[in-house]
């Protein structure tokens, strides 16, 4: 199973959920039925843990992100960047078996793939501050 690819899929699902606001069970079933990914290569336990973990802890996660936005509000952040921040913040706060440096680095790598240069620095800065709290 590929954790990097699983993390990317989790971010994509968080993004889709931020747009559609679907029920997570429906979101996961739809993903499994229509994905082009080889499900055998994905860590579905991790993906489910992240998706439900973010949903169940969204107030804490968003509150911690918002603390370090420097005169920004969550509503001003693109849904892609917010999904990356939520995923990585969840890992930093709730996944003891994932070193925070890995969560930050993977968040930055996702930003490099899905966002622009200023967003990469922004995401890195916010995640670094969350990890240090």
Image (cartoon, rainbow, N blue to C red):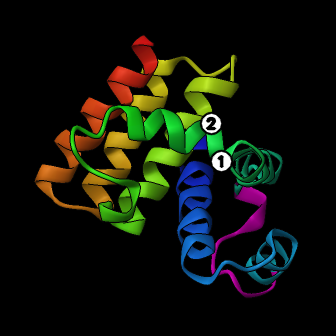
Q: Quadrant of residue 90?
A: top right
Q: Which residues are magenta?
A: 33-41
Residues at badges 2 and 1 in contact (C-beta under 8 Å)? yes
Query: Disc 2 versus disc 1: distance between alpha carbons?
Result: 6 Å
Please check the rendered image and state whether residue 88 is part of the magenta-colored stretch, yes or no: no
**Vertical placement of 69 versus 74: above or below?**
above
Residue shown at 67% from the left, 78% from the top: 21
Q: Which residue is mark 2?
A: 60
Residue shown at 44% from the left, 51% from the top: 84
Side of 126 relative to 49 (left or right): left
- Residue in the foreground of this view, choosing between 123 and 4: 123
Residue shown at 58% from the left, 75% from the top: 16
- Residue in the foreground of this view, choosing between 41 and 66: 66
Query: What x and y, as percent, mark residue 76?
Result: 30, 63
Secondary element under disc 2, as helix, strand or loop, is helix
The residue at the far top in this view is: 132
Secondary element under disc 1, as helix, strand or loop, is helix
Query: What x and y, as percent, mark residue 22?
Result: 73, 80
Query: What x and y, as percent, mark residue 26?
Result: 84, 79
Please check the rendered image and state whether residue 40 is part of the magenta-colored stretch, yes or no: yes
- Residue in the foreground of this view, choosing between 16 and 105: 16
**Vertical placement of 24 versus 36: above or below?**
above
Side of 128 relative to 43 (left or right): left
Evaluate whether residue 65 shows in this view. Answer: yes
Query: What x and y, as percent, mark residue 83?
Result: 48, 57
> Any mark on residue 58, and which?
1
Bin the neighbour count of mark 1 within 10 Å (Cα to Cα): few under 14, some 14-19, many 20 and up.
some
Side of 129 relative to 34 (left or right): left
Residue shown at 79% from the left, 45% from the top: 49
**Vertical placement of 79 versus 82: above or below?**
below
> Any mark on residue 14, and which?
none
């Amino acid at each position: 199973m590929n954790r990097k690819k699983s993390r990317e899929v989790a971010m994509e699902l968080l993004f889709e959920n931020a747009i559609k606001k679907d029920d997570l069970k429906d979101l996961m079933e739809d993903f499994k039925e229509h994905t082009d990914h080889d499900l055998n290569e994905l860590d579905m336990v991790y993906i489910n843990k992240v998706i439900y973990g973010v949903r169940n802890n969204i107030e804490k996660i968003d509150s911690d992100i918002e603390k370090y936005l420097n005169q920004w509000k969550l509503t001003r952040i693109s849904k892609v960047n917010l999904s990356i921040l939520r995923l990585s913040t969840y890992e930093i706060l709730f996944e003891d078996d994932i070193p925070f440096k890995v969560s930050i680095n993977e968040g930055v790598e996702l930003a490099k793939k899905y966002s622009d240069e200023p967003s990469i620095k922004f995401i890195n800065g916010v995640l670094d501050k969350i990890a240090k709290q």
